[in-house]
Image: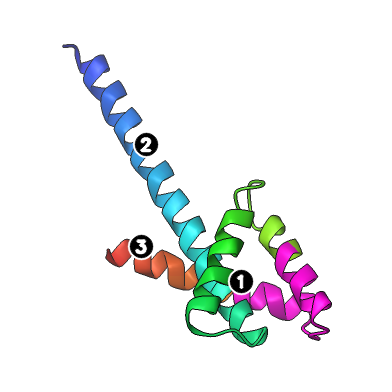
Amino acid sequence: MTTFDDREKAFESRFAHQEKVDFAVEARTSKLFGLWAAEKLGLSGADANTYAQSVVAANLEEKGFDDILRKVRKDFDAKSIEISDHLMNVELDKALAEARKQVQSS
C-alpha cells in the first residue's frame, strides 16, 4: 500500500469519526433541549422522556436546529406558554454546550 493510500484511509477514517461525533452531539442537544421544553410544558418522568424523544425525531427533518425550534414553539403556543424565541435560543445554546461536553467525555 502506498503512502497516499494510507493518508487517504486516515483522512476517511477521521472524517467518518467526526461525522459520528457531530451526529451524537446534535442528537444529545435535541434531547437536552427537549427535556428543558418538557419541564416548561409541565411534563415529568416518562412523559418528559417521550417528549424529548419526539424533539430528537423532529430534528431529523432538516440540518440544524430550526426544525426543533419550530416544533417546541408550536407546542408552547398550543399550551399558551409565553417563552421568547431569544430564551429558546439561549437554552438551545446551553444544551449544545452541555451535549459537546457529554459526548467528549464519553
Residue at numbered disc 1 = 92
- From the top left corner, tell me how far across and down residue 45 is, in percent: 48, 83
- Is 83 inside the magenta-drawn segment? yes
Query: Separation of disc 1 and disc 3 at Cα?
Result: 16 Å
Q: Can you see residue 95? A: no
What residue sits right under mark 3 in the picture? 103
Q: Horizontal and vertical percent for residue 31? A: 51, 67
Q: Please report whichever mark, 1 or 3, sits nearer to the chain's N-terminal start.
A: 1
- Spatial CA distance of label 3 from label 2 is 16 Å
Which residue is at a point 81% across and 86% down the rendered structure image? 82
Could you tell me the amino acid type at mark 3? Val
- Magenta-colored stretch includes residue 89: yes
Please indicate, yes or no, whether residue 1 appears anywhere in the rendered image: yes
**Residue 54 to residue 62: above or below:** below
Q: Earlier in the sequence, mark 3 or mark 2?
A: 2
Question: Which sits in the foreground, 39 or 44?
Answer: 44
Residue 67 in the image: above or below residue 90: above
Q: Residue at x 64, y 56 (%)?
A: 58
| Quarter holding residue 11 | top left
Q: Amino acid at mark 1?
A: Leu
The span shown in magenta is 71-91
| Quadrant occupied by the N terminus | top left
Mark 1 secondary-structure assignment: helix
- Whole-percent x, y for residue 63 in the image: 63, 47
Query: Can you identify the residue that label 2 sits on?
Result: 16
Q: Which residue lies at the image location 33% right of the left edge and 62% below the top edge?
A: 104
Mark 1 → mark 2, Cα distance in angstroms = 26 Å
